[in-house]
Image (spheres, rainbow, N blue to C red):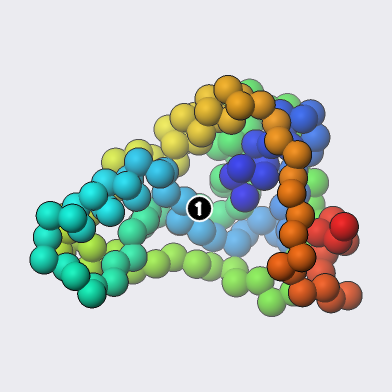
Amino acid sequence: VIALWMNALMKGNSYVIYGSGGQKRAYTYIDDLIEGLYKCGFEDVAGETFNLGADEAYSLTELSDILQEVTGGTLPPTHLPDRPQEVKISIEDHAKAKKILNYKTMVDLKEGLRKTWEYAQSIGPQELIYTDIEIMSDKMPANWRK
């Protein structure tokens, strides 16, 4: 969602929030994930599975507000109806990674968005590439259809 929203802003377009914007996710900056993966190379964890990511969840509305602040945005998001069967809250349990790998996030959401915005601006807006992976349905949001 972050890449899509930033891409829209760089093109001078509004980005989309489905439903109320109350859906919650925990967003993790790539450096934190890489650190967790790196630590796996130095522990006896062959065959283990870990959830790596941020513990703090943000609603899409909160994410939007922080993104607007970071980008200096003045273009508000467009609200569309809820997506059918969307998971409203998705937060993983990182207790195992914390215990075994001493995993923790170091980059907070605002700083991660700032760094990502700088990178996105350095490569410029991108054209979206649609594939045939999606299962077409009349319940699919209209702006997802080719």
Identify the residue shown where x is 37% and y is 53%: 54
Mark 1 burial class by Cα count in 10 Å: few <14, some 14-19, many 20+: some
Instruction: Using the image as rendered, state which of residue 30 and residue 75 is in the foreground.
Output: 30
Q: Position of residue 9 (x, y in %)?
A: 72, 32
- Viewer-side residue, 125 vs 116: 125
Q: Quadrant of residue 72?
A: top right
Task: Name the residue: 82% across, 64% down.
Answer: 141
Residue 59: horizontal and vertical position, in percent? Answer: 56, 54
| Residue 69 in view (yes/no) | no
Do we see residue 10 in this rendering?
yes
Amino acid at dot 1: Tyr
Query: Residue at coordinates 63% horizontally, 32% vertically from top-left?
Result: 68
Q: Is residue 118 above or below residue 38?
A: above
For this rendering, which residue is in front, 39 or 104?
39
In the picture provided, is 103 more to the left or to the right than 87? left
Q: Position of residue 136 (x, y in %)?
A: 82, 73
Give the total of numbered labels.
1
Q: Which residue is disc 1 drawn over?
A: 58
Residue at image x 81%, y 69%?
A: 140
Q: Is residue 47 left or right of residue 111?
A: left
Front-most of 20 and 143? 143
Image coordinates for residue 133, horizontal then vertical, percent: 71, 68
- Secondary structure under the numbered disc 1 in the rendered image: strand
